[in-house]
Image (cartoon, helix red, strand yellow):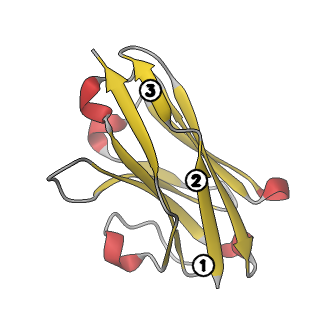
C-alpha cells in the first residue's frame, strides 16, 4: 500500500502562486510514477502533470505548460506542484496520485492506483 497526503492548498488572488506538496509513505515509493490531477465542481477529473521519481521525465497538460512545475524530493518522499500565475479557472480540488512502479506517465486517472484525499485551491479574481 501507498499512502499519499497533500497539503499546501488555500485561497490566493489571481496572478499569485502556491506550492502543493504530496507526502508519500508505504512501499518503495521512489519507484512510482506520481501524478497531479484536479477536479472543479461539476467537471471531470483533469490531468495536471506527472513525474517519474527519478525526475528524468515530466509531462504536463498542454494548457498548463509554463505555469505549473512538478518536482520530486526522493529524500523526503515528497512530490511538489509549483503553480504560478494562477487564474480563477485553476480553482479546483487538487489530487496527488501514484502509479505502479516503473510505469510510464499517462494522463488517465483510472491508470493510477493510489490517491490522496485532495487539497482545495481557490483563486479569487
The image quadrant of residue 121 is top left
Q: Marks 1 and 2, Cα distance to the nearest angstrom?
A: 22 Å
Residue 67: % across, % down? 42, 28
Q: What residue sits right under mark 1 in the picture? A: 102
Marks 1, 2: nearer the viewer: 2
Secondary structure at badge 2 equals strand
Q: Residue furthest right?
A: 75
Residue 84: % across, % down? 47, 24
Q: Earlier in the sequence, mark 1 or mark 2?
A: 2
Residue drawn 31% across the image and 69% down it: 108
Q: Residue furthest left?
A: 42
In front here: 61 or 89? 89
Q: Earlier in the sequence, mark 3 or mark 2?
A: 2
Residue drawn 56% across the image and 68% down it: 33
In front here: 80 or 50? 80
Secondary structure at badge 3 equals strand
Q: What residue sits right under mark 2 in the picture? A: 6
Residue drawn 61% across the image and 80% down it: 101
Amino acid at each position: 500500500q501507498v499512502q499519499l497526503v497533500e497539503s499546501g492548498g488555500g485561497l490566493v488572488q489571481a496572478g499569485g502562486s502556491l506550492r502543493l506538496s504530496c507526502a508519500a509513505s508505504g512501499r518503495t515509493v521512489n519507484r512510482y510514477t506520481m501524478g497531479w490531477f484536479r477536479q472543479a465542481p461539476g467537471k471531470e477529473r483533469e490531468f495536471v502533470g506527472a513525474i517519474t521519481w527519478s525526475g528524468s521525465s515530466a509531462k504536463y497538460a498542454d494548457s498548463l505548460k509554463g505555469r505549473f512545475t512538478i518536482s520530486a524530493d526522493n529524500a523526503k518522499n515528497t512530490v511538489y506542484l509549483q503553480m504560478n500565475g494562477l487564474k480563477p479557472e485553476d480553482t479546483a480540488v487538487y489530487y496527488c496520485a501514484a502509479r505502479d512502479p516503473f510505469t510510464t506517465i499517462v494522463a488517465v486517472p483510472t491508470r493510477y492506483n493510489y490517491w490522496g484525499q485532495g487539497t482545495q485551491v481557490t483563486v479569487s479574481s
